[in-house]
Image: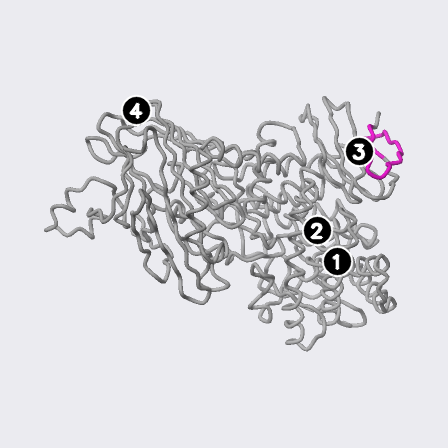
C-alpha cells in the first residue's frame, strides 16, 4: 500500500505549503499552521522574511512559528488526518482536520499587510475541550535537530488579550521586530484568555524531575515561549479567527505601532472582508492571462504563476528556491531570466520590469567590480543580493551572468516597446556586453574565442569557447546596436562588427556533423547548446542543425527517469525538471509536439502540492522543493506550446499533442506588445483574436499548420481572425 499524504498529489513526497507576499515567506504543515513538532526533510515550519539574514550571503533567519494545540480532558491531542488543498487563484490553503474528538476546517492565507490569517470552522469540539494558540521560536526539533537561531533571545509578553514576541538579530545585517497574535471568536471574547509564564515541559531530556507542576502540565507540548492564548467553550458550528502580524524595522521604523495598526484594521474589517480583499488581489493578478488544457496542467499553470509572484521581492529580486535552510544563500542567479520569460509571456510586464530594475539598481556596484579588475565597464559577478550587489564578484568565473542580464534587459523592451525604459536599461546592456568583450574575448590560435570559464553544467573544468557565453555576446552585440539606433546613441559599430564576425567563426568551429557543441573541446553537451539555439535565431552558425543538436543533448544529459543537468555536472540525479522544461520550450518553438513529453515528465517531479523539485536525487527524494526557476520555465514552455512568434509570424498551437483535445488561452503576450487568444477542440481552431497594445500599427502573419493569413493590426485594436 502506498503512503498517502495531504495535498493535491497524495502519492508524492509531502512538502510544506508555501505562502508568500514577496517579503514574508511562511511554511505551513498539515495543521494549516506551523504546529508539527519536528522537521520534514530538513525543513521546519517557520515565518521568514526573505532578506532578513545574519550575513549577506546567508539564508534568511527563521523568526517565529504560529502554532496551535488541541486539548481534551485526556490531554493534548495530535492530528490524525488532514486533507489539504491549495487554491493558487486565491492563495489560500484549506485543511480539513480530524484529531480525536476534534473535527474542523482551517483556512490559511497571508496578506500583503504581513498578516497570517487562520480561520477555524468547527464541526466537532469536545465538552471541556480547549484549543491553545502560541507564537514560539523553539529552535530544536522533536528529534533534536537544531534550527538556525537569532543572535538575541525572543522576549514574550501578553497584553490586551494578545501575545507579543519581540525579536532581534545583531550580526552583520541587524534587524529587530515584533510578532503580535490576536484571536477573534464567538460571543464577546469571554472564551479567549491570554496567559503568560506557563510552566510546562518542553522535551523529556530537559525536565526537572523535582518540578511536579511542570511534569503535570498537559497544556502545550513542545512550547518554549511559555506564553499562549487559550480558547474554551467552543461549540460545533462556531468560527474562530487567529490573526498574526509580524513586522520589523525594515517594514517600518515604528514597526510595533505599525503591527498594532494593521491588526486593528483587520479586526475591524472582520474575517470575510479581509479574506475577500486578499482573494481579489490574487484574482486580479491571475486575470491578465488564462489557459485551459487539463485539470492538472491548469492547476500547475496557476500554481506556478502564484509561486513567482509570492517570492518576488519588492526590489524585483527572484531567488531560485525559497525553502530554507541551505538554499543557494537566498540570492539572485541567472535563473531570473526564466522567471522573466514567464512574466512576459503571461502578460505581467510590471513584474518583468521589476527584475530589470534590480539590474539597473546594481549597475553602480557592477562598475566598481569592473574597475577592481582593471576594466571600465560593468561586471555583476554571479550571485546578487536584493540590491543588485555581489559581495563575492571578484572570486567567480561563471561570467555568462553578465550576458544573461543584458539579454533580460533587451527582452523586456522587445515585449513592451517602451523607449523610456530602454533609455534607463541601455547602459546595463551595453556595459555588460562591453565587459565580456574586454575581459573574456581573446584571440586564440588564429581565431577569436571566449576565454576559459565555468560552463552551464557547473563542471569543475573551465572550458574555452563556451557556446552559451559566446551566444550571449553575439546577441548582446546585436541588441546594443539596435538599442543605439532607437536611442540615437553614438557607437563604434566597426568594433562590435569585428567581434561579431570573430565569435560567429568561433561558434562555427564548435559545430561538427550538425551538432552545436557546448564548448570548443566538443564532448558531451550541456543545456547551453539548446539555449544558444533558442536565442541565436538568424545568428545561428550555418553548421548547426537544431534537431541533431537536440538528439546529442539528450544523449549527453539523460538520467534514469528523465533529463538531467549533464554527466559532467556535480548534480547527478534521477530527473532535473528545470532541464526538462527548457527542452520543452526548445521543441515548442520548433513546432514539435514532443514538448509535451518533457512538460508532463517534469510535472511528475513535484511535491504533494505541485511544487517543482530542483531535482530528484538518485534515491528518489527531492533535493530542494518549490524550485522557482522550474515554475518559471514551466510557464514559458507551456506558453510557447500554445502560441509562439517567428519573426513576424504568429504560430497558433504549434506544439499541442493530439491527446490535448480541448485547449484554449487568453491574452498570452508576444514581442511587439501583442496579445493572442485562441480556442481549439479536437485539432480544429475555432477562435483566434489578436490585440495590438502598441502605439504603432503592425502587420503579422497568423499561421496554424498549413493555414496562414496576413493581417494588419491597428494600434490599440483587437481583430478576430477566421481560419
Residue at mark 4: 235
Q: For this rendering, which residue is in front, 698 or 550?
A: 698
In which image quadrant can residue 654 be found? top right
Q: Residue at x 79, y 35 (%)?
A: 691
Q: Residue at x 75, y 36 (%)?
A: 643
Q: Main secondary structure of the magenta part?
A: strand
Residue 6 is situated, as x and y percent measured from the top left of the image, at 42, 33
Q: Any magenta on residue 31?
A: no
Residue at mark 3: 690
In three-dimensional space, the C-alpha distance between marks 1 and 2, rounded to whole angstroms, equals 9 Å
Which of the two discs, 3 and 2, labels the residue nearer the N terminus? Answer: 2
Tag 1: Cα neighbours inside 10 Å, few (<14), some, or many (≥20)? many
The reply to whether the C-beta atoms of the residues labelled 3 and 2 are less than 8 Å apart is: no
In three-dimensional space, the C-alpha distance between marks 2 and 4, rounded to whole angstroms, equals 60 Å
Residue at mark 2: 531
Where does the magenta region start and end? Answer: 702-720
The reply to whether the C-beta atoms of the residues labelled 1 and 2 are less than 8 Å apart is: yes
Which of the two discs, 1 and 2, labels the residue nearer the N terminus? Answer: 1
In which image quadrant can residue 152 be found? bottom left
Q: For this rendering, which residue is in front, 253 or 400?
A: 253
Secondary structure beneath label 3: strand
Amino acid at each position: 500500500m502506498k503512503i498517502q499524504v495531504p495535498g493535491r498529489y497524495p502519492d508524492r513526497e509531502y512538502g510544506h505549503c508555501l505562502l508568500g507576499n514577496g517579503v514574508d515567506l511562511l511554511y505551513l504543515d498539515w495543521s494549516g499552521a506551523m504546529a508539527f513538532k519536528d522537521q520534514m526533510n530538513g525543513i521546519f515550519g517557520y515565518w521568514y522574511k526573505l532578506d532578513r539574514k545574519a550575513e549577506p550571503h546567508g539564508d534568511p533567519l527563521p523568526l517565529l512559528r504560529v502554532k496551535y494545540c488541541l486539548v481534551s480532558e485526556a490531554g493534548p491531542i495530535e492530528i490524525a488526518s488532514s486533507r489539504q488543498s491549495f487554491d493558487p487563484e486565491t492563495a489560500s490553503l484549506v485543511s480539513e482536520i480530524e484529531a480525536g474528538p476534534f473535527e474542523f476546517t482551517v483556512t490559511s492565507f497571508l496578506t500583503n499587510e504581513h498578516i497570517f490569517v487562520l480561520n477555524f470552522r468547527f464541526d466537532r469540539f469536545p465538552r471541556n475541550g480547549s484549543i491553545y494558540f502560541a507564537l514560539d521560536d523553539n529552535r530544536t526539533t522533536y528529534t533534536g535537530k537544531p534550527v538556525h537561531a537569532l543572535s538575541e533571545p525572543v522576549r514574550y509578553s501578553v497584553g490586551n488579550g494578545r501575545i507579543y514576541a519581540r525579536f532581534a538579530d545583531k550580526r552583520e545585517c541587524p534587524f529587530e521586530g515584533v510578532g503580535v497574535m490576536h484571536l477573534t471568536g464567538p460571543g464577546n471574547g469571554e472564551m479567549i484568555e491570554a496567559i503568560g509564564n506557563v510552566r510546562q515541559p518542553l522535551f523529556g531530556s530537559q525536565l526537572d524531575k523535582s518540578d511536579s507542576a511542570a511534569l503535570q502540565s498537559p497544556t502545550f507540548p513542545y512550547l518554549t515561549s511559555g506564553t499562549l492564548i487559550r480558547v474554551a467553550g467552543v461549540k460545533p458550528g462556531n468560527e474562530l479567527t487567529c490573526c498574526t502580524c509580524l513586522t520589523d524595522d525594515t517594514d517600518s521604523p515604528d514597526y510595533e505601532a505599525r503591527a498594532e495598526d494593521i491588526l486593528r484594521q483587520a479586526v475591524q474589517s472582520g474575517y470575510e472582508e479581509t479574506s475577500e480583499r486578499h482573494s481579489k488581489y490574487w484574482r486580479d493578478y491571475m486575470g491578465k492571462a488564462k489557459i485551459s488544457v487539463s485539470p492538472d496542467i491548469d492547476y500547475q499553470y496557476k500554481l506556478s504563476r502564484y509561486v513567482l509572484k509570492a517570492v518576488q521581492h519588492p526590489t524585483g529580486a527572484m531567488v531560485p528556491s525559497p525553502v530554507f535552510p541551505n538554499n543557494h544563500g537566498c540570492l539572485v542567479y541567472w535563473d531570473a531570466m526564466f522567471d522573466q520569460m514567464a512574466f512576459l509571456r503571461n502578460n505581467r510586464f510590471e513584474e518583468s520590469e521589476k527584475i530589470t530594475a534590480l539590474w539597473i539598481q546594481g549597475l553602480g556596484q557592477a562598475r566598481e567590480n569592473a574597475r577592481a579588475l582593471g576594466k571600465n565597464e560593468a561586471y555583476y559577478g554571479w550571485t546578487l543580493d536584493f540590491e543588485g550587489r555581489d559581495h563575492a564578484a571578484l572570486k567567480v568565473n561563471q561570467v555568462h551572468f553578465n550576458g544573461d542580464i543584458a539579454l533580460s534587459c533587451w527582452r523586456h523592451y522587445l515585449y513592451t516597446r517602451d523607449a523610456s525604459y530602454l533609455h534607463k536599461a541601455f547602459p546595463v546592456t551595453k556595459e555588460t556586453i562591453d565587459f565580456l568583450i574586454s575581459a573574456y574575448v581573446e584571440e586564440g590560435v588564429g581565431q577569436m574565442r571566449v576565454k576559459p570559464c565555468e560552463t552551464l553544467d557547473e563542471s569543475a573544468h573551465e572550458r574555452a569557447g563556451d557556446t552559451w557565453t559566446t551566444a550571449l555576446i553575439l546577441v548582446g552585440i546585436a541588441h546594443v546596436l539596435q538599442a543605439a539606433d532607437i536611442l540615437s546613441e553614438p557607437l563604434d559599430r566597426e568594433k562590435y562588427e569585428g567581434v561579431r564576425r570573430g565569435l560567429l567563426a568561433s561558434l562555427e568551429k564548435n559545430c561538427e556533423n550538425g551538432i552545436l557543441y557546448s564548448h570548443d573541446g566538443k564532448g558531451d553537451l550541456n543545456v547551453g547548446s539548446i539555449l544558444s539555439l533558442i536565442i541565436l535565431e538568424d545568428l545561428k552558425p550555418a553548421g548547426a542543425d537544431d534537431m541533431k543538436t537536440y538528439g546529442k543533448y539528450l544523449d549527453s544529459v539523460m538520467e534514469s527517469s528523465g533529463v538531467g543537468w549533464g554527466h559532467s555536472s556535480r548534480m547527478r540525479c534521477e530527473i532535473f525538471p528545470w532541464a526538462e522544461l527548457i527542452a520543452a520550450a526548445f521543441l515548442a518553438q520548433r513546432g514539435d509536439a514532443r514538448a509535451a513529453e518533457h512538460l508532463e515528465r517534469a510535472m511528475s517531479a513535484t511535491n504533494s502540492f505541485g511544487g517543482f523539485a530542483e531535482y530528484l536525487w538518485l534515491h528518489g527524494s527531492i533535493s530542494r522543493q518549490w524550485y522557482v526557476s522550474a515554475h518559471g520555465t514551466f510557464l514559458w514552455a507551456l506558453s510557447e506550446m500554445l502560441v509562439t512568434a517567428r519573426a513576424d509570424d504568429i504560430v497558433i498551437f504549434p506544439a499541442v499533442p493530439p491527446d490535448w483535445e480541448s485547449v484554449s488561452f487568453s491574452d498570452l503576450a508576444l514581442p511587439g506588445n501583442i496579445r493572442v487568444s485562441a480556442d481549439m477542440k479536437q485539432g480544429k481552431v475555432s477562435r483566434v483574436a489578436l490585440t495590438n497594445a502598441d502605439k504603432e500599427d503592425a502587420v503579422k502573419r497568423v499561421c496554424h499548420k498549413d493555414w496562414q493569413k496576413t493581417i494588419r493590426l491597428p494600434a490599440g485594436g483587437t481583430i478576430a481572425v477566421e481560419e
